[in-house]
Image (spheres, rainbow, N blue to C red):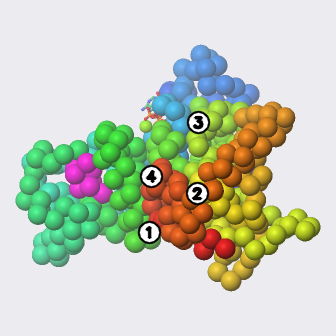
Amino acid sequence: MSTQTAREPESLEGGTDVTFSVRGLWKIFGRNADKVIGTELETADRDRIKEETGCTVAVRDVSFDVRPGEIFVVMGLSGSGKSTLIRCLSRLIEPTAGQVLLDGEDIGAAGQQRLRELRRHKMAMVFQHFGLLPNRRIVDNVAYGLEVRGMGRAERYARAGEMIDMVGLSGYENARPGELSGGMQQRVGLARALAVDPEVLMFDEPFSALDPLIRRDMQAEVSRLQRELNKTSVFITHDLQEALKLGDRIAIMRDGELVQVGTPEEVVGRPANAYVADFTSDVARTTVLTARWLVRDAYPGERTDGPVTEPGTVLAEVLPMLAASTAPVRVVEGDTLLGYVGRDDVLRAIAEDQLSENAVAVAIEETVGELSEESTDPAERAADGDTGPQGGEARGSTPGAPSNPTGHGGPAPTGNGG
Ligand SMILES: Nc1ncnc2c1ncn2[C@@H]1O[C@H](COP(=O)(O)OP(=O)(O)OP(=O)(O)O)[C@@H](O)[C@H]1O
Ligand SMILES: [Mg+2]
């Protein structure tokens, strides 16, 4: 029943080292759902399909891989098909066409018994509205998945206790969900999902009901747990900042289709089309793009004794280093010199897409001028090796983000100042 995908995202690898492998996945809601694919309507837009068949195309010919250990974020506006997509992965919603492999196993071919097993042992879901049992204590809620699985009482309560501890709720074991704040309730949701030690965590807008400060705490918590427990996550959000902060890779959905799959840097630095560019236009590129993105060989005659930084350092932290030095920054990974990043490189990256070429030149001149002035006094600041002048701000906007596969997480190193 698999349909051919017209154009596959470049990141598709298949093979064994893939957690989810999704190919040509469709979900069409409505009575005549099976009468769309394979006809000339297949390529028609959503509205026309709705008009002519009464069907809603929620997910359209989607293909992607989720790699072990990554946070794969799916983002898009309301109605773009995110929830439908994540539910198709575990067949909580039955796909209309296409294939989903989990560790190489065809989910579509699994019988009811096998599906239940997979849902109990390999996947766990964290929901937007927590989904806690109101009359049960916190510890019972967290132990619930283990109970369903048939684990003995003593063992499951011991495990639940550990999970409650892990999400920072020790002391609340006997409280009821209603006595906890929203953020705390979502920690319970997280503990419950983690308790079954699933291979994959699935999050469907888990933090959208939380206020911004609590939300930031919870994002940091997910980052931390992801790193410590080495889980694979599929995380849905319609918040771009959240996607950039958490995602190792981000899939951007529009009208049921994936318009781009890439790292935060790729999505922001090299948007696939005008839609993605527009979507990401408000993002401060300096907090997303890193030295690795810009690294190049030295120009002839260029100084090669500048400050040293790691490839994962965001540009917001590279800038003050450049301001304090007339030589380009040396980008070093372990013992390997990857190359150099100079002032012009950074400024061009910031200005790209937003200004005409001429304006870029002017902006570069002006900004370099400003930076040089600024750098007369804080030379020692930049040389102190730990907090650059903008360090606090930059970290504030990307707290603890293991936001790319380069291993950049936590406080970014700012080099030795030369
Ligand atoms: N059970 C259903 N029956 C019919 N249409 C549905 C059903 N579930 C979803 N849809 C439609 O499919 C499309 C995608 O919905 P979906 O809930 O997947 O979007 P979403 O991206 O999760 O949106 P939100 O951000 O609002 O949660 C929408 O047009 C929606 O109306
Ligand atoms: Mg949804």
Q: Does the residue at mark 3 contact the one at mark 2 (Cβ under 8 Å)? A: no
Distance in Å between CA atoms under marks 2 and 1 = 38 Å
State the SS at label 4: helix
Residue 36: quarter of image = top right
Q: Is residue 60 visible?
A: no
Residue at (64%, 19%) from the top-left corner? Answer: 48
Quadrant of ligand 2 in image? top left
State the SS at label 1: helix
> Which tag is nearer the camera, tag 2 or tag 4?
2
State the SS at label 3: loop
Distance in Å between CA atoms under marks 2 and 4 = 24 Å
Residue 396, labelled with which disc? 4
In x, y percent, where is residue 97? 59, 44
Residue 303: quarter of image = bottom right
Q: Mark 1 sits on what residue?
A: 227
Residue 282, labelled with which disc? 3
State the SS at label 2: loop
> Which tag is nearer the camera, tag 4 or tag 3?
4
The overriding secondary structure of the stretch rendered in magenta is: helix
Magenta region: which residues?
183-190
